[in-house]
Image (spheres, rainbow, N blue to C red):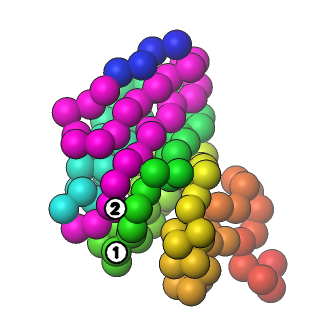
């Protein structure tokens, strides 16, 4: 298992095996940190070519603004295109509310190959 802090302000990356990476997020996911998260996640995908599961541990995310939501959606598109399943783990209630209100909870948390729309 590899563990290393990043140059990004508040993200720790752990790689328990060649198929899995965990990004442990801390603080706000907003316009000042969203680009850093996207760059870090894309770098992890590039550096770990056999990656299958990218876990974002959100337990310590204090807030998420529209830019933060936008980067989560962009990251979901990129991971899906790369054949990587994006996991939003340990979401705080405020993040779940935001995802529910915006209609993005299903698309961002549905298992691969499963429909995330209520109509199937």
Classify 10 Å Cα crowding around label 1: few (below 14), some (14-19), many (20 and above). Answer: some
| Residue at 31% across, 27% down | 5
Q: Is residue 106 left or right of residue 25?
A: right
Q: Is residue 34 visible?
A: yes
Identify which residue, 61 or 113, lies in the foreground: 61
Task: Give the residue drawn at x 53%, y 40%.
Answer: 54
**Up-down relation of residue 96 to residue 100 (above or below):** above
Q: Secondary structure at mark 1?
A: loop
Q: Can see residue 84?
A: no
Q: Nearer the viewer, residue 6 or 70?
A: 6
Q: Are marks 2 and 1 in contact (CB under 8 Å)?
A: yes
Q: Which mark is residue 29?
A: 2
In-image side of 35 versus 55 (left or right): left
Among the 4 quarters of the image, the one containing residue 16:
top right
Q: Is residue 74 magenta?
A: no
Residue 24, percent from left and from top:
45, 40
Residue 118: percent from left, percent from top: 78, 83
Is 14 magenta? The answer is yes
Tally of numbered discs: 2
- N-term-proximal mark, 2 vs 1: 2
Residue position marked by numbered label 1 in the rendering: 65
Q: Considering depth in this image, is 72 or 112 the residue closer to the camera?
A: 72
Q: What residue sits 31% from the left and 50% below the top?
A: 37
Q: Residues within 10 Å of mark 2 (few under 14, many from 20)?
A: many
Q: Is residue 67 above or below residue 43?
A: below
Q: Position of residue 102 (x, y in %)?
A: 52, 84
Q: Is residue 103 left or right of residue 78?
A: right
Question: Residue 90, how many percent across, how many down?
Answer: 61, 52
What segment carries the magenta color?
5-31
């Amino acid at each position: 298992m590899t563990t290393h802090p990043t140059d990004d302000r508040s993200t720790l990356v752990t790689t328990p095996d060649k198929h899995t990476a965990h990004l442990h997020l801390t603080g706000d996911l907003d316009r000042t940190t969203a680009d850093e998260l996207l760059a870090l996640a894309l770098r992890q995908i590039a550096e770990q070519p056999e990656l299958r599961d990218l876990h974002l541990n959100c337990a310590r995310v204090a807030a998420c603004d529209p830019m933060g939501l936008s980067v989560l959606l962009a990251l979901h598109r990129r991971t899906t295109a790369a054949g990587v399943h994006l996991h939003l783990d340990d979401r705080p209630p405020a993040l779940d509310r935001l995802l529910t209100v915006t209609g993005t909870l299903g698309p961002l948390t549905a298992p691969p190959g499963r429909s995330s729309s209520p109509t199937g």
